């Protein structure tokens, strides 16, 4: 649970469904972010999966929000796009999350309706190539954009006065965002001989 | 005119066709087509859904102990329920028992999820089928306060409170940012509440939005992690350390006390807000008793919430277990997940392929091979269907049947089974609710009855949480802090081959997973989810499923505004799991209604 009481609380959120190929971009991005960087206490890194209203309380507790997500902008597969503030709901509206088709747009307006939406929103979206490959991996053009997307995220954080520290020692397995064979590497090792 | 279905419905598709696609405010993508007669009464209904394509392709050759983590990702609402069903399936296959504390904690997590889902479903997905938001703007705050105080002692009920809310709402509307409210058919004559009841309901919509976050904390505390809690084959992952002071993940007294206070508030919210609201809103719709469908004929409940760890017999299960067929409430039939003749899935009208589609397959032998073909009378193309042909394949949902019968599952099914078993904890609240509403028992079998059963169940679940919390604390105080059994954790201790099943009652109905394990890896894994039961297409005999049956014979005020269809379909709390497909950015939010 986020308990930070600092004035500049930041949520770095990845959303999407890892079971539908490039739909998993947002979750895989924060997973990688967390493995690569250590962040100060006022920053929370969260794998939001396809959770809808469950995420409202995390939004409420944040002054600033960065969302990683696979968004269909009709661009070239793998192309990144960064949008800010008022533009964010419009773009996330292009996609449905879960919780009874609560789009992330509706998660934002629910927080807004409660009068507790983050003041600053940034969406780092990636144009997917394949969303139909049930159980499939991220496609190459999307996978290749994780590192550049993380750099964009770091730039935004720097702009907000947050310095991320590259981890010097590898993150312990118990500290990782995803485990039990659904972490990125193990998830994509499919069809291996028993 | 028309064709008689074996399960007792007369369907006639000669009238005007109405297409609702997508049905909004549900989990996943769903399409409904109906034919109405000259009086706009529904005479034929076709429900079609996109569906995840079977988890077996992803789980094959994985470690059975990790299956829960995958199934948790199928869907954003049944998260914990899928995980619980999965660990139960593995435990059943390998003969693993769990400690008493783990049983209590699992029950608490499952019941918390039930309450959360029921509250969110009613206020955020279903209420707007009954409540006209725009109408609330013209309510008198003083009269709203009088109304609210007449039905409950809930403290947030002053004229000033409702006035402030109305002002906030007006501002929200004027900003043009309708957000969650944009799909309503505001002003439709199918809405029957006076402005004050509408305003009160909207107030509680917001309170529920705020309160639901508290319920989620229970998952976080016991699951160690949110929004994707941890689960464990053999028990629960969080150790109990009563005297601990906040060690990461451990359950200590402070956390148990926090859970206890959330349970108290949740009981209060259920009993002072949720149930009174359902009764108050329902009282304006007493003449709208459509939507019963299969609920008075064939219902199925697997049962859940075991009183004793590892005892899944109907005696131990606090949510009732059993099947009722042909409307015979005097006989509740036993259900066996392992019997190949009982639960079977058919695909003759589903976009899958079987070697022999006249026959159903038991989930242990289930296959999921896509076969996307439209029937000969479908209109449009495969990428832009204008009209489905229900004579051919028309849905991604399979058709599960119990001994050949189409069944309704969900809160109403559970409560009908409990009622038929003469269990006072189910029968008495139903009788009282109907008596207060001055309605006969037959009124229970309706859209309204489904919505009421969910509210009654939320109240029931809150009290059960109190029971299991007390039981857990008493057991810990008696010196038992065990939460996991790791005797058979190592795959070396497993047999060469094993198979099992696990079941739960998810908020929206009966859920089961079937697993086959070979050489310590998953060989086959099948889930039959609640919306597969309710949203199923027809079977080879022509029986229609629960959604389709529930729409039959419903009159529509205005087919261009299919509020009645949404109302009834929403009353099932449909969940067409994991369909987070990207849709085109234009016009995807509004349901498109086409009248042909």
Image: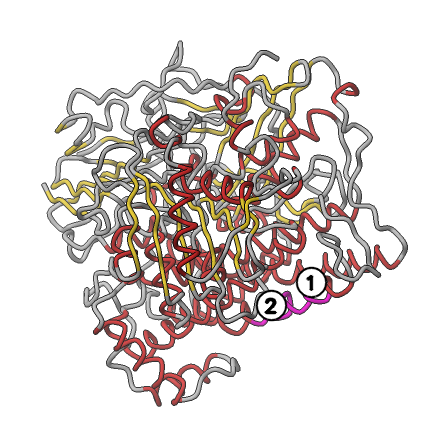
Work out which quarter of the rendered image holds the N terminus of chain B and state it.
top left
Residue B435 is situated, as x and y percent measured from the top left of the image, at: 49, 68
Magenta span has B267?
A: yes
Left or right for B139, reference B499: left
Q: Is residue B572 visible?
A: no
Work out which quarter of the rendered image holds the C terminus of chain B and state it.
top left
User: Quadrant location of residue B585?
Assistant: top left
Residue B171 is situated, as x and y percent measured from the top left of the image, at: 26, 77
Q: Residues within 10 Å of mark 1 (few under 14, many from 20)?
A: some
Q: Is residue B161 above or below residue B445?
A: below
User: Quadrant location of residue B574?
Assistant: top left
Work out whether disc 2 and disc 1 sit on a shared chain: yes
Which residue is under mark 1? B466
Q: Chain of mark 1?
A: B
- Magenta residues, as a range? B257-268
Left or right for B596, reference A176: left
Please tell me the numbered disc located at residue A110: none
Q: Main secondary structure of the magenta part?
A: helix
Residue drawn where x is 20% and y is 38% of the image: A74
Which residue is under mark 2? B267
Colour setup of the view:
secondary structure
Of mark 2 and mark 1, the one earlier in the sequence is 2
Q: Nearer the viewer, residue A54 or A185?
A: A185
Residue A33 is situated, as x and y percent measured from the top left of the image, at: 50, 43
Q: Is residue A16 visible?
A: yes
Q: Is residue A23 above or below residue B346?
A: below
Q: Are marks 2 and 1 in contact (CB under 8 Å)?
A: yes
What is the CA distance from the residue labelled 2 to the residue labelled 1? Answer: 9 Å
Residue A158 is situated, as x and y percent measured from the top left of the image, at: 43, 56
């Amino acid at each position: 649970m986020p308990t930070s009481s600092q004035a500049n609380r930041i949520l770095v959120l990845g959303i999407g469904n890892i079971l539908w190929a490039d739909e998993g971009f947002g979750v895989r991005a924060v997973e990688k972010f967390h493995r690569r960087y250590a962040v100060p206490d006022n920053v929370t890194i969260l794998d939001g999966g396809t959770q809808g209203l469950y995420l409202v309380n995390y939004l409420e507790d944040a002054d600033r929000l960065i969302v990683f997500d696979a968004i269909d902008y009709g661009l070239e597969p793998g192309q990144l796009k960064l949008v800010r503030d008022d533009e964010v709901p419009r773009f996330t509206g292009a996609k449905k999350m879960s919780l009874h088709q609560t789009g992330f747009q509706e998660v934002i307006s629910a927080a807004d309706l409660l009068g507790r939406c983050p003041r600053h929103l940034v969406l780092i979206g990636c144009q997917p190539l394949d969303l139909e490959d049930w159980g499939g991996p991220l496609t190459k053009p999307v996978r290749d954009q994780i590192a550049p997307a993380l750099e964009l995220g770091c730039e935004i954080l720097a702009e907000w006065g947050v310095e991320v520290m590259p981890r010097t020692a590898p993150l312990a397995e118990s500290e990782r965002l995803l485990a039990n064979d659904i972490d990125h590497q193990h998830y994509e090792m499919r069809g291996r001989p028993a | 005119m028309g064709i008689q279905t074996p399960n007792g419905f007369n369907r006639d598709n000669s009238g005007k066709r109405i297409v609702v696609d997508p049905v909004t405010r549900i989990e996943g993508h769903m399409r409904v087509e109906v034919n109405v007669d000259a009086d706009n009464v529904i005479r034929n209904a076709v429900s079609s859904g996109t569906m995840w394509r079977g988890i077996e392709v992803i789980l094959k050759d994985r470690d059975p102990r990790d299956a829960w983590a995958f199934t948790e990702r199928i869907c954003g609402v049944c998260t914990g329920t899928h995980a619980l069903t999965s660990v139960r399936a593995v435990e059943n296959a390998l003969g693993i028992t769990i400690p008493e504390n783990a049983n209590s904690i699992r029950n608490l997590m499952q019941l918390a999820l039930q309450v959360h889902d029921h509250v969110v479903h009613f206020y955020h997905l279903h209420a707007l089928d009954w409540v006209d938001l725009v109408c609330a703007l013209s309510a008198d705050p003083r009269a709203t306060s009088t109304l609210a105080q007449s039905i409950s002692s809930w403290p947030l009920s002053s004229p000033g409170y409702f006035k402030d809310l109305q002002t906030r709402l007006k501002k929200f509307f004027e900003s043009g940012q309708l957000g969650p409210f944009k799909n309503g058919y505001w002003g439709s004559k199918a809405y029957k509440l006076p402005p004050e009841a509408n305003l009160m309901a909207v107030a509680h919509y917001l309170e529920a939005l705020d309160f639901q976050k508290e319920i989620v904390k229970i998952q976080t505390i016991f699951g160690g992690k949110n929004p994707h809690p941890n689960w464990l084959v053999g028990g629960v992952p969080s150790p109990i350390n009563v005297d601990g002071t906040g060690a990461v993940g451990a359950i200590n007294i402070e956390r148990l006390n926090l859970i206890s206070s959330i349970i108290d508030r949740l009981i209060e919210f259920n009993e002072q807000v949720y149930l009174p609201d359902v009764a108050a809103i329902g009282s304006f719709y007493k003449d709208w008793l459509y939507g019963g469908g299969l609920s008075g004929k064939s219902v199925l409940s697997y049962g859940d919430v075991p009183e004793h760890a590892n005892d899944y017999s109907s005696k131990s299960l606090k949510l009732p277990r059993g099947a009722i067929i042909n409307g015979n409430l005097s006989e509740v039939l036993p259900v066996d997940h392992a019997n190949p003749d009982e639960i079977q899935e058919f695909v003759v009208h589903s976009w899958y392929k079987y070697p022999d589609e006249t026959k159903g397959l038991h989930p242990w032998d289930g296959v999921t091979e896509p076969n996307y073909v439209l029937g000969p009378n479908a209109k449009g193309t495969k990428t832009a269907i204008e009209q489905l042909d229900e004579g051919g394949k028309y849905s991604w949902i399979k058709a599960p049947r119990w001994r050949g019968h189409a069944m309704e599952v969900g809160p109403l099914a559970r409560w009908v089974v409990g009622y038929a078993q003469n269990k006072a904890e189910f029968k008495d609240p139903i009788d009282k609710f109907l008596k207060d509403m001055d309605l006969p028992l037959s009124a229970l079998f309706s859209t309204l009855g489904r919505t009421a059963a969910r509210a009654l169940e939320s109240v029931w679940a809150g009290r059960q949480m109190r029971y299991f919390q007390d039981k857990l604390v008493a057991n810990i105080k008696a010196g038992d802090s065990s939460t996991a059994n790791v005797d058979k954790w190592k795959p070396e201790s497993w047999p060469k081959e094993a198979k099992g099943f696990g079941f739960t009652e998810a908020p929206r109905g009966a859920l089961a997973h079937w697993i086959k394990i070979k050489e310590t890896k998953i060989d086959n894994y099948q889930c039959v989810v609640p919306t597969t039961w309710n949203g199923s297409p027809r079977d080879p005999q022509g029986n229609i499923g629960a959604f389709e049956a529930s729409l039959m014979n419903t009159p529509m005020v205005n087919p261009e505004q299919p509020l009645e269809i949404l109302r009834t379909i929403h009353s099932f709390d449909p969940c067409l799991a994991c369909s987070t497909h990207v849709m085109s950015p234009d016009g995807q939010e509004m349901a498109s209604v086409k009248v042909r």
